[in-house]
Image (tube, helix red, strand yellow):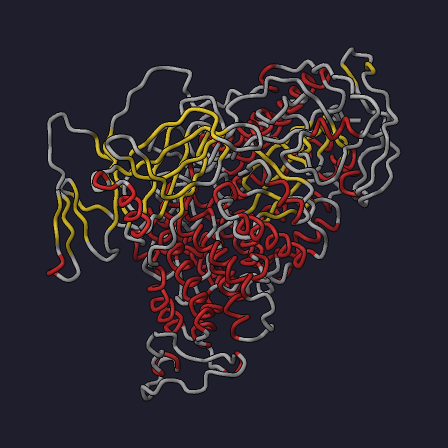
Amino acid sequence: MGEIHSNNGLKPIPDAIVNNGNHGTDTPPTDVGGDAQSLQPLSPETLRCVADEVRKSFVRPLGKSELVLLEVDPYRLHAFWTVTREAMELARDQLGTDGKQASMILRVMETNTDETGSFGGATFDVEVGGLQSRSYIDIFGDARRYQAILGLRAADNRFVTMVTSNPVELPRPSSATTNAFCQIDIDAAERGTFSSPSAPLGSETSNGASFSWFGHDDAETVPARFPLPPGTPLGRGVLSAEGPRQSAEEPAAEASAAQHDEAPAERPPLVLEQALTSSSYGLGRANGFEVIAELHVHGHAEPERDLHLFGRKIPLRPDGSFSIRHILPNDPSVIEALLSGGDPSTDRGDH
Amino acid sequence: MALGYLAIVLHAHLPYVRHPEYESFLEETWLFEAITEVYIPLLRVFEGLRDDGVDFRITLSISPPLLAMLQDDFLQRRYLAHLEHLTRLGDQEILRHHVDSRFLETARMYRRLLQETHDIYVNKYGRDLVSAFGRLQDDGCLEIITAAATHGYLPILRTQPAAVKAQLQVGAESYRRTFNRPLPGFWLPECGYFPGLENAVQEAGGRYFFVETHGILNATDKPQYGYLAPLACPNGVAAFGRDPASGRVVWSANEGYPGDFWYRDFYKDIGFELDFDYIKPYILDGETRIFTGFKYYRVTGDTNEKEPYEADRATERAAMHADDFIKRQQDAVERYAPSLDKPPLIVALYDAELFGHWWFEGPQWLDFMIRKLAADQNTLDLITPSQYLQRYPVQQCAQPSASSWGDKGYSDFWLNPGNDWIYRHLHDAAGRMQEVARDNPDVAPGTLTFRALQQAARSLLLAQASDWAFIMKTGTAVDYAYGRTRDHLARFHYLVDAVASGTIDEQRLEALETMDDIFPEIDYRVFA
């Protein structure tokens, strides 16, 4: 099909703007074909006009149902979701008369560390809301792999799933406890060739530190000013890996061992200061006792409107969403939300 | 042979800011300031070292948006106009201070630097700083690498793997076209790493990347060399861990060198201090106060009563701090080397913009430090990651841990209630881009559909820049960050809608191509 040249539903750019302020007729441009050189250079005003017009394309209708999980840090997940109205109604129908009062729940589940991804651990529920919203989930267990489902839970705990998330793995919060050690030859991995090791493992240096596989003379030349071309044979004994493109999930130790007739000798750990081998990059969870309670008020409105909550104006993001945190009052209180601006007939409040 | 190695890595990046739709634009001054205060001073330092026969090697990451802006004729012309304004301001400043010797020398210093900058920029480099850096690489002094296409924070973009792949591949292609050589390694934006990312790095041609210290220390197996040697990921790509101590002495606001009382204070700038009518003729649009670079006071201490800046004293401090830095690294190497069976490697990562912009004396410090390393000692050798891997191709194999160099060490800075709203939109748009790329595998180049798809890919990449989430979190130019995110996503959806409906307005397309003029040779199918 030939390309149709049209304004895609937008008003034509007035000639006065296209012609850099030379006032002409309002006839829309008729020659919009051909190559770019045949078009007049675009003035800043024209560019701004286009930018303003195109901006309307930002607001999108609700898409398909989806739940996405992301790891924030070793103890926090972030979830955002979209649930279509149809999916919500279907879920409510499945719960029958209890459907109307059912809560929207984000059910977070530990998954097994094996490759089945099956749910093997603890599960907990977080009450959430909104067809399109997001939430943070604090993790208190030691498990690293999680998945979540978003659904409706009735008063009798019946649960209907609306959408399932991707699996995530939280970052490791501390050093590995094993001293497993394997090595690969980066150059061999790149070249896709492998050589069998020519250097003995486990030989000692004169200072007593374990020295495993260097077969070259330590008295190397001063590094050349110009880097050596890749693939230059360097005459060293190397330890080879099973394959150059291992999957991230494949244990490297297995690959290394597979290359040799015998399992590599376990290399005793080098004596390094604790600070250099274990991370104390913690999040303060081991220290102190702290309780924080706050009210998180969030939602969405038309982006052009003015929103007031707790008696103050709340900024709306370009997509109309808003999010504020409010210290819990000591006494019972009413949260008043007022939406104004735009067509006065559509002003409304809520409590 | 040296007892240990020091790899200095400078990462130069600015968000892609280019607004031909306005006669002038405030945020473009970020680039202009950086050219004057960072990139040209660094070039002068490196060229001076090379010309003096100093044996050195530094790793320099230049992000694709910065490469594009430095090579952009439109921005080059605007920069020159900005420089000419400031030079005239320099003339006025000398007149203003002619009776006050406390400030006259400093005013003269700025005027001289501006004139030299103009002369170097126009006559020596022909406005082409990228080629100047490239020549230093050709001479073996620099190892230049690059980052993801628009500096997208990959651990969050991974919700759509095509987005990660596109960021790295477009970044790599930008590098190859610019420098006409293979890419040695990647600077992962914000050192943001997640397990498995090395596969995309390798696919894009990178042999190494950098992670924050705990990315190494919390790897799948305990790192036997700590962070003093890289880890080889299972696919052979190397991960170099940042040395925390060398970072602290330079970065820390409390204990770092830039806070020294004799160094120039950043914030007391005449652009914000003096009467507006005086400043107005020399700035941007004549309406908006900006940093001019004319700063006359030193840090002095924790006080608002700042003392006049004395350049000679500051230079002395820079030399002293260079000595101190070398001594610290030597001490570290001498302490750890006996425990290791290969020389320890200290990887010192910094934002390039620290040197000269935030820390005015930073380039001097680098110059002193490199000269002293070359002349006064033989404990430490400077090395680049590629050279290190050439010498030591066999590395412990383990997978680093997810990490970043942001505050708290993970994704919090880019994923928090201040900016999390953008990710659903980025996720959705990346999914949509993948669909449209797969649905249009063989579009003829030069057609409107092809151009629209190319431009949609550019718009999406620009929306993915981590800078917007960063700015939203820091709260410095939030409206601008909101606007950029919204506008790029709007342009993306507009273009994809147009392709889907078969109705493409060529004039609007050309306008979008004019405004977001990056990656001219992008192939939208990188998202497929």
The spot of residue B460 in percent (x, y) is: 48, 57
> Image check: B277 left or right of B257?
left
The spot of residue B309 in percent (x, y) is: 45, 37
**Does residue B260 appear in this view?**
no
> Image check: B462 left or right of B128?
left
The spot of residue B463 in percent (x, y) is: 45, 54
Residue furthest top in the image: A208
Name the residue located 48 percent from the left edge and 61 percent from the top edge: B84
Give the total of numbered labels.
0
**Does residue A319 appear in this view?**
yes
Check the image and report above or below for B196 versus B493: above
The spot of residue B486 in percent (x, y) is: 37, 56
> Image check: B415 left or right of A234?
left
- In depth, the one of B473 and B107 nearer the eye is B473
> Image check: A43 left or right of B347?
left
- In depth, the one of B87 and B221 nearer the eye is B221
Check the image and report above or below for B506 versus B394: below
Check the image and report above or below for B117 versus A165: below
